[in-house]
Image: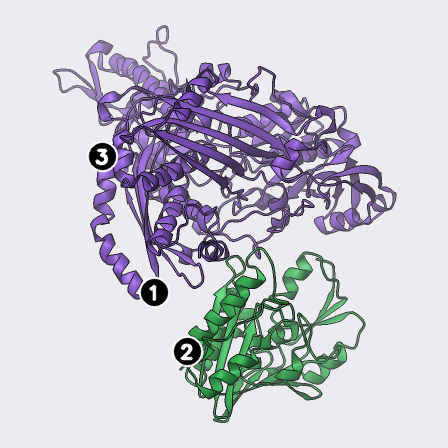
Chain colours: A purple, B green
Amino acid sequence: MPKDDGIGAATVRREDVRFLTGRGRYSDDIKAYGECAAVFARSNVANGTIKSINTDVAATMPGVLAIFTGEDFVEVGGNPAGWLINSRDGEPMKEPKRPVLAHGKVRHVGDAYAAVIAETAAQGRDAVEALEVEIEEHAAVINMKDALAGTNYVHDEIGTNQCFDWGWIEDNRAATDAAIKGAHHVTTLELVNNRLVPNAIEPRCSIGDYNPGTGDYTLQTTSQNPHMTRLLISAFVLGIPENKLTVIAPDVGGGFGSKIYHYGEEALVLAAAKKLGRTVKWTSDRSEAFLTDAHGRDHVTKIELALDDKGNFLAFRTETLANVGAYLSNFSTVTPTFLHGTLMAGNYTVPLVYVNMKTVFTNTAPVDAYRGAGRPEATFSLERVIDMAAREIGRDPIELRRQNFIKPDQYPFASAAGLEYDSGNYDALMDQMEKVSDKTGFAARRAESEAKGLLRGFGVNAYVEACGIAPSNLVGILGARVGLYDAATVRVNATGNLSVMVGAHSHGQGHETVFPQIVADMLGIDAASIDIVHGDTSKIPFGMGTYGSRSLAVCGSAVVRATEKIIAKAIKIAAHMLEAEASDVDFSDGTFSVKGTNKSVSFGEVALKAYIPHDYPIDMIEPGLEETAFYDPANFTYPSGAYCCEVEVDPETGKVRVDRMTAVDDFGNVINPMIVTGQVHGGLGQGIGQALVEQTTYDDDGQLLSASYMDYAMPRADDLPFYVVDHSQSTICTHNPLGAKGCGEAGAIGSPPTVVNAVIDAMQSGGKNITHIDMPMTPHRVWTAMNNAQ
Amino acid sequence: MYAFDIERPTSVADAVAALKDQDAQALGGGQTLIPTLKQRLAAPSKLVSLTNIADLQGIANDGDTLRIGGAVTHATVAAEVRLTYPALADLASHIGDPAVRNRGTISGSLANNDPSACYPAVALASGATIITNTRAIAADDYFQGMFTTALDDGEIVTAVSMPIPEKANYQKFVQPASRFALVGVFVAKFAGGVRVAVTGASNEGVHRWAEAEAALTADFSAVAIAGLTVSADNLIADLHGSPEYRAHLVKVMTGRAVAAAS
């Protein structure tokens, strides 16, 4: 067995060879013969009635092939929400139609109401400018509280701006209220989880093709989950039969959630391709990405923590308004509910949790899952209010957390928010965090900072999240309109190398390296002889794609199950070749051998026999060596961690600098520690970005003020410290065959409250009575808070 | 981007002639203009590139004054004046990113007069003279408000004459997204007095802070401005800072520039 590329090896990412040498093949790199361009006409007002669209002039412009408006899609379906959520009173959520192109009304700046297909994109843009459009502008619905109080509706037909009013766990509501009412101490905090623009480095791109000779459609698109996109287009939007539609997601330059969803542009290029018999491409520019990619977060929350006189947590209660924007994106209803409310017990033995979540339509871009998806919002609220409570009652924030931690002997643990955590050891994570962060050296570092005129703060955080979504039966009960298994096909070729077709999609995660490590480890063969095929519905089994840190825990488990089937069949073939009973054949390190003898055959020999089945028990064993497995997880997985950071704040300018950041995570069994470290680094960068610089601002008219990199700050290398990343304190996931929990989102979940807690600590050390600052903690905001505290 | 013609003259005279066409637009390094064109926010019929004109290249030093050709890039300034005018080199080395510094030119920056750009601050604080194809304009007369200069249509900045101060420093407090100056202060100490230029702060664009200049001319130390206040009137309000914040930063950055001046 080549140990250097099996499970646990820090194998170098093979996909980076093409990415780093310019050989990646992204959607816009694909040039089809006769391809033409789609260009969208997008609303420049947030809320308006489309009075007329006159296409006469535009239609005669050079190169123009066709013009579509919302009228052309009245007969087709809408793009649905993936989860049906019921309000506390049992009423189903409001689900207004999300059309391919806006019809009747435009509902956010960037909402597409027409599309021009032209020979070139430049000609298409000229024609879009020549459209004669009359849109009657209405007052925009932007602020969530105003949206709920007013009668100006984003969707007139539903007569409200509230999508649903959800309670979790509703049966615990009265008990939670009573616990808070009678508590020795209650800490209350109102906070904002700031709206984020996803900013994948590759903007969205969709290419539609139609073959009139066969009736086959092909969509090449920037997707994290091509099968789900196909299902949505087939079953809900255009009605193209699944067998006539191939969806291909080639190399994709990052998604962070924003490319999970089906967007109208994908349906448009398919419809246009059918109409014209031409390949139709649309490539988003960066401005369109800012205006139309599904944004993330955007919660306004009031959280209360009740404690007894010994510091034991008695209850958490939250009231949150969550922005869903102008239309329901596919995961927009599950993200603030089951991916959020179920985590509101955190790492703690707290007996009562009650979450009230009202989701609100506004005249802004749709809001949906973004790296962490609901769990960052939960962790942020919990870990901020716990920090505040520790300060209020004069307890050390680490000790207060430890006192309330679930202990290692309590697993499986039924949390007060309705989940069953299978494993964890939060004290061990905290111990390791204190050790590797050199916490004891903080006082000396603070003195050094103060000598320079700077304030230094130490912030801590503990988190647990839920990954590996999800058991299909459970999510079905909770309102999901799909299952959440994944699938893999392991195809052993005749010459002994392998193609592994997986339902997960890799757009930065390193699947092409990691999945072969698993198979190589199980089969005892060289990982270099194994290739991963993903992203093409015509090649791979029906998988649910990549999000929610699920690829390894769910699709990786399917890879294990399929490989187990390969081994089981190969043992039968080997037994025949070795003239032995299958029960007497052992398989290890790529060799089948008969117990107690020196008789053996190699994996390669068995593969060849399977495909050239001469002298083969054809009546008992089928030829070939190819197996498929669908894996439906038994539970979520529960990664957890303890983070800390140290910040320096310049009291004269309000500038915050993260000086040290330590992330100690329990991801269960780690397959490739280098890739895991990279995932944590990426998540930390995004989390620190949310905490310090990323600011999405709509004005009262619904104009996005931070609509370019001139005003929307992304974290850059010099905003970030060198990280200490540790995953030595693992507990194994008990219910999947890899023991893996998932690592993709942890950094973005654990870091924002850590940074805010550190800044508040710095403020307090400077004698400022500041208990909270909303993210992003820009210099202006920190300076203003300090000024107001004087 | 809309279609346009481009000319690449090799002499100032040819450039001036080319710019006489209606809707012709001079192109320096293009670090502002090209993104503007890509957004279809401008539609010049013709771009006249200035970067192939030999007379607009090169940096000369007569001991008291630098003469910087109009088409000299920020990267070249950063590399070549490090010993003669280190504060200028430092300023140039922190404009944008390497791509911007390798393309962007001093004349492009000065002609655009972005209210948050760095070069206007050093030009004004140094008491520079902006030399064009027709005349020499004192910096005090050249900068006339946000995106507004004394340049006439078709007039080309051919060089900048920059007196070298005894001591100088530039403090840029960056806007987190664009990394232009949220507030930038350039302090230059000459034998005849101190000049303080502020960028990023005002709706009027780059400007001098007269009270600080007087105080620092009398006593070149951060303490000298401790008693001064900066009015927030007519300062920029945007996502990244209020007028009051900018007013505060003007004083803080001035103090730091004085302390760091060398």
Q: Are marks 3 and 2 in contact (CB under 8 Å)?
A: no
Residue A660's disc is none
At mark 2, the secondary structure is helix
Query: Can you identify the residue that label 2 sits on?
Result: B223
- Which amino acid, mark 3? Ala
Tell me which label, 3 or 1, sits earlier in the chain.
3
Spatial CA distance of label 1 from label 2 is 16 Å
Q: Residue at x 70, y 32 (%)?
A: A100
Q: Secondary structure at mark 3?
A: helix
Provide the chain ID for the residue under circle 2: B
Q: In 3D space, how far apart are the residues under numbered discs 3 and 2 (Cα atoms)?
A: 52 Å
Labels 1, 2: front one: 2
Residue with the mark numbered 3: A428
Does residue A328 appear to the left or right of B228 in the view shown?
right
Subunit bearing disc 1:
A
Q: With B6 as the anchor, is B56 left or right in this view?
A: left
Question: From mark 3 to mark 1, how far is it between C-alphas?
Answer: 36 Å
Q: Is A191 drawn above or below residue A604 in the view shown?
A: below
Q: Residues within 10 Å of mark 1 (few under 14, many from 20)?
A: some
Could you tell me if residue A580 is visible in this image? no
